[in-house]
Amino acid sequence: MAKFTYKGKSEEELRKMSIEEFIKIIPSRQRRSLKRGIKEAQKNVLEKLRRNPKKFIRVKVRDMIIVPEMIGATLGVYNGKEFVRLDLKPEMLGHRLGEFVMTRKHVKHSAPGFSATRSSKYIPLK
């Protein structure tokens, strides 16, 4: 099994990096977002993770970019209805939390509804 690397850096090297060093190797869209500063809600999530990284934390900041110090944590990310469990893996680095928690369900159609077709308009009288 191959060892995980991100832009030529191993997982251990990534964990030792500061956020400023990590910004230099992520794609431009994420880099721009982090250079503009971390929002207050995102700071709170990082502080909670630093205090207790193994604890399950419920968050609503879907636009937060996954940084190396978050790897291995378990978050409950809000999808608009409930908190969906998300285990952060090294492959998720540089992505946003919302990318891994879908907000809409797949529509499953069954039988046609009432008045959907000519044949379904017929209702037998007993």
Image: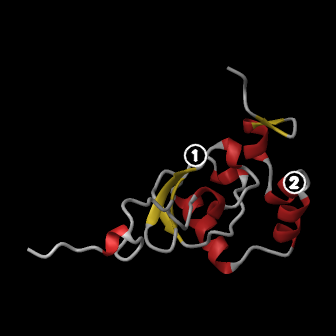
Q: Name the mark on residue 72.
A: 1
**Residue in front for this viewpoint, 102 or 13:** 102
For the residues labelled 2 and 1, the Cα–Cα distance comes to: 20 Å
Mark toward the start of the polypeptide (2 vs 1): 2
Answer above or below: position of 94 versus 118.
above
Residue 47 percent location from the top left of the image: 60, 66
Residue 89 image-quadrant placement: top right
Residue drawn at point x = 37 percent, y = 77 percent: 115
**Residue in front for this viewpoint, 47 or 33:** 33
Q: Name the mark on residue 21.
A: 2
Is disc 1 surrounded by few (<14), some (14 to 19) or many (20+) residues within 10 Å? few
Residue 26 percent location from the top left of the image: 86, 53
Q: Secondary structure at mark 1?
A: loop
Residue drawn at point x = 70 percent, y = 42 percent: 91
Answer above or below: position of 93 versus 46.
above
- Which marked residue is nearer to the observer: mark 2 or mark 1? 1
Is 115 left, or right, of 68 in this rendering? left
Residue 2 percent location from the top left of the image: 72, 23
Is 111 left, or right, of 92 in this rendering? left
Residue 56 image-quadrant placement: bottom left
Residue drawn at point x = 87 percent, y = 54 percent: 21
Q: Indicate the amino acid at tag 2.
A: Glu
**Residue in front for this viewpoint, 17 or 91:** 91
Number of numbered discs: 2
Is 82 left, or right, of 65 in this rendering? left
Residue lying at the far top of the rendered structure = 1
* Screen quadrant of the N terminus: top right
Residue 53 percent location from the top left of the image: 54, 53
Q: Indicate the amino acid at tag 1.
A: Gly
